[in-house]
């Protein structure tokens, strides 16, 4: 199996972003924002971040036969990322993003073609030559489950970013090696009583199903790396945040790229922390993702 080849299966959107002083309240209209548009979606973000971190990436996603879809095709062609496009006859997904002056964001997504993907869109041959597979949840759960199952059958390491937060069936978790939720998502995973923390409950559930590592992203505080025999807090970086959109996707993409390149898990998490901290200092998601040379210029 080829090292450093990563398959990313996930969503593609056209992101429409407005930067404003503060987020509006219910029924309120704010004037004076700045507008930008660009390529987004968790899958697209993660594929771009992994490619910039040096991985050879294949990206499987769904887009429409429309101008937004053409923009996405052109972007990935320019980035020299191998793509496998599904075109189910729906409009390309669109995300409306608001970002305030502190970098806090609010996002609404119309999934479009992403929601029309079906398990048959994932062919077993897709996994040929891939050592790692990265998944997220902006595509239908049956597609995620089929991908994870076929990836494990092909001998791939399966990394799942369970975002947006959703109930995760045991059948899926049995096929996942590494799970990367944030604080909110880990609470949904836990389904715990009050006798233990959400972190402990989530780890217990995941490890009982055969999981190998639970990595909980904590923003500027870094990431908590939990394994069956040890826990470790991998410190983050305190930086002035301009725009946090895509930071979690940047983390996941760089983590997957680092693991595909043969780095140990703790080292991979440290590099992912660094990349995410760099990304929040620039506007936009993909435009803010750092290069391989920047990420790996020195030990994390």
Image: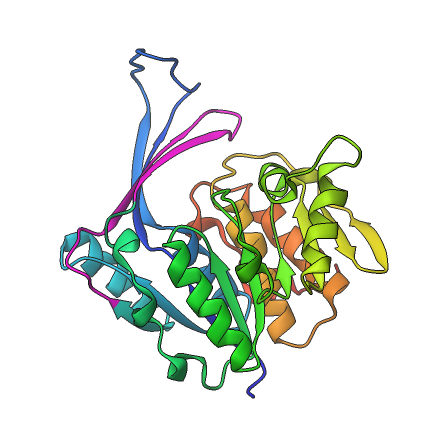
Location of residue 187 (image quadrant): top right
Residue stretch rendered in magenta on the structure: 86-110
Q: Pick out the residue farthest to the right.
A: 229
Q: Position of residue 291 (x, y in %)?
A: 53, 62
Above or below — where is 59 with respect to 102?
below
Residue 29 vs residue 118, the one in the foreground: 118
| 233 left or right of 71 in image | right
| 222 left or right of 292 in image | right
Residue 251 vs residue 196, the one in the foreground: 196
Q: Position of residue 170 (x, y in %)?
A: 57, 57
Is residue 294 located in the magenta-colored stretch of the structure?
no
Q: Quadrant of the N terminus?
A: bottom right
The residue shown at (28%, 61%) is 62
The residue shown at (49%, 71%) is 149
Is residue 95 located in the magenta-colored stretch of the structure?
yes
Q: Position of residue 114 (x, y in %)?
A: 30, 54
Q: Quadrant of the C terminus?
A: bottom right
| 111 left or right of 41 in image | left
Q: Position of residue 158 (x, y in %)?
A: 57, 68
Above or below — where is 37 with respect to 146?
above
């Amino acid at each position: 199996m080829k090292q450093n080849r990563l398959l990313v299966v996930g969503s593609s959107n056209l992101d429409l972003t407005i930067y404003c002083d503060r987020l509006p309240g219910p029924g309120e209209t704010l004037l004076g924002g700045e507008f930008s548009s660009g390529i987004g979606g968790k899958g697209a973000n993660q594929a771009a971040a992994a490619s910039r971190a040096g991985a050879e990436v294949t990206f499987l996603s769904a887009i429409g036969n429309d101008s937004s879809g053409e923009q996405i095709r052109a972007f990935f062609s320019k980035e020299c990322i191998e793509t496998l496009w599904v075109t189910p006859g729906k409009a390309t997904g669109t995300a409306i993003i608001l970002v305030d002056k502190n970098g806090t964001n609010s996002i609404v997504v119309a999934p479009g073609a992403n929601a029309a993907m079906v398990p048959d869109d994932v062919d077993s041959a897709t996994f040929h030559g891939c050592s790692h597979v990265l998944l997220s949840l902006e595509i239908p759960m049956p597609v995620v489950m089929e991908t994870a199952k076929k990836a494990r059958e092909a001998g791939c390491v399966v990394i799942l970013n369970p975002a947006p937060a959703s109930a995760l069936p045991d059948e899926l978790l049995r096929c996942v090696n590494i799970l990367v939720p944030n604080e909110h998502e880990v609470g949904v995973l836990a389904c715990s009583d009050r006798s233990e923390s959400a972190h402990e409950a989530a780890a217990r559930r995941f490890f009982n199903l055969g999981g190998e590592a639970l990595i909980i992203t904590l923003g500027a505080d870094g990431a908590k790396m939990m394994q069956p025999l040890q826990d470790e807090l991998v410190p983050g970086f305190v930086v002035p945040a301009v725009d946090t959109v895509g930071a979690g996707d940047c983390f996941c993409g760089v983590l997957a790229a680092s693991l595909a390149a043969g780095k140990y898990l703790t080292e991979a998490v440290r590099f992912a922390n660094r990349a995410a901290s760099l990304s929040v200092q620039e506007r936009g998601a993909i435009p803010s993702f750092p290069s391989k040379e920047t990420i790996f210029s020195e030990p994390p």
